[in-house]
Amino acid sequence: MAHLSEMQAKVSVTADANKKHLPDKQDHKASLDSMLGGLEQELQDLGIATVPKGHCASCQKPIAGKVIHALGQSWHPEHFICTHCKEEIGSSPFFERSGLAYCSNDYHHLFSPRCAYCAAPIMDKVLTAMNQTWHPEHFFCSHCGEVFGAEGFHEKDNKPYCRKDFLAMFSPKCGGCNRPVLENYLSAMNTVWHPECFVCGDCFCSFSSGSFFELDGRPFCELHYHHRQGTLCHGCGQPITGRCISAMGHKFHPEHFVCAFCLTQLSKGIFREQNNKTYCQLCFNKLFSQ
């Protein structure tokens, strides 16, 4: 005990002597190392064994107090620092890369994938799509802004779209209803149609024969096409596709241009008119001559 008191006195004297001047950092470090070395030697002289906790991987000196075990080595807490910013890591979480330690902020800034939308590091869940990485909440429809659900997304010009907006914006439109054509369709008149929309523009009947007539960009059955063109026979009401006779503001099949009384075909287009009806000369004389 006397030896221990004597050693404490020496340490006290040394400390008092150090108060007489303010050394620079290097002198202080050398003095501290000398004091620790002397203290270790004095303890050994007193028969008190000093067992170091290892040697610091940074300064290579023995560790007598707190110790950090990381990367398979031991460190003074103040020497276990971030490789990039040099700030003390201590007991805080850290990341290892190529045998070096990084604080959380620097590791994510230097090595984490970045979001294609906000360009910030992705620190948690990462979504990979279109050969890029995204924060899950930042991968949304380029048109409506909704995050994609189970139905996934469609890509156009390197932009993602939900199914609804993609079909509305980029799918071919039906020539009849102007809604997107998704499945079965007909191609006619340089556009596409839902089968149920490709009908006559007047009677809305489908073209069972497969043939139709086009007028002003719309399809028509034969009857209504000729009706709009003014080429229906005034006698039978059917389309005129060959020779015709024009009379009294109407058109007729030649065989249907007949006398209203005797029903004889009016040859050579010679007729008499009475009350918007046609008559041959003989019947006209019988019926209307005084």
Image (cartoon, rainbow, N blue to C red):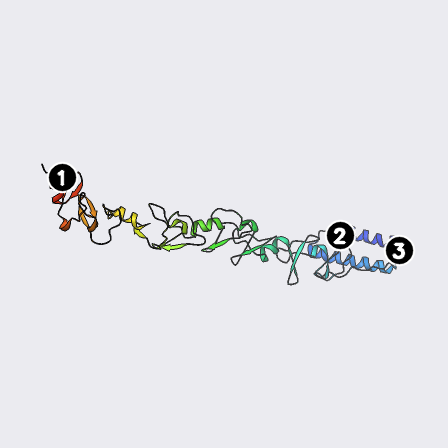
Closer to the observer: label 1 or label 3?
Answer: 1
Amino acid type at mark 1: Leu
Earlier-in-chain disc, 1 versus 2: 2
Q: Residue at x 84, y 58 (%)?
A: 43
Labels 1, 2: front one: 1
Between the residue at mark 3 and the residue at mark 2, the CA separation in whole angstroms equals 23 Å
> Residue 248: which quarter of the image?
top left
From the image, tell me which residue sits under label 1: 287
| Kind of residue at badge 2 | Asn
Along the viewing direction, whichever of 282 and 41 lies nearer the viewer:
282
Q: Is residue 276 above or below residue 208?
A: above
Nearest to N terminus: mark 1 or mark 3: 3
Dividing the picture into quadrants, the one containing residue 59 is bottom right
Question: What amino acid type is highlighted by mark number 3?
Answer: His
31 vs 91, nearest the viewer: 91
Give the x, y percent position of residue 192: 38, 53
Rendering coords of residue 215 (x, y %): 29, 50
Which residue is the site of mark 2? 18
In the image, what residue occupies the spot 63% across and 53% down?
104
Q: Residues within 10 Å of mark 1 (few under 14, many from 20)?
A: few
Q: Residue placed at 44% from the left, 49% from the top?
A: 168
**Left/right of residue 124 with respect to residue 254 in the rendered view:** right
Mark found first going from the N terminus, 3 or 2: 3
> Which quadrant of the rendered structure holds the C terminus?
top left
Judged from the image, the secondary structure of the residue bearing numbered disc 1 is helix
Q: Is residue 77 visible?
A: yes
Measuring from the top left, give residue 184's x and y in whole percent. Answer: 44, 54
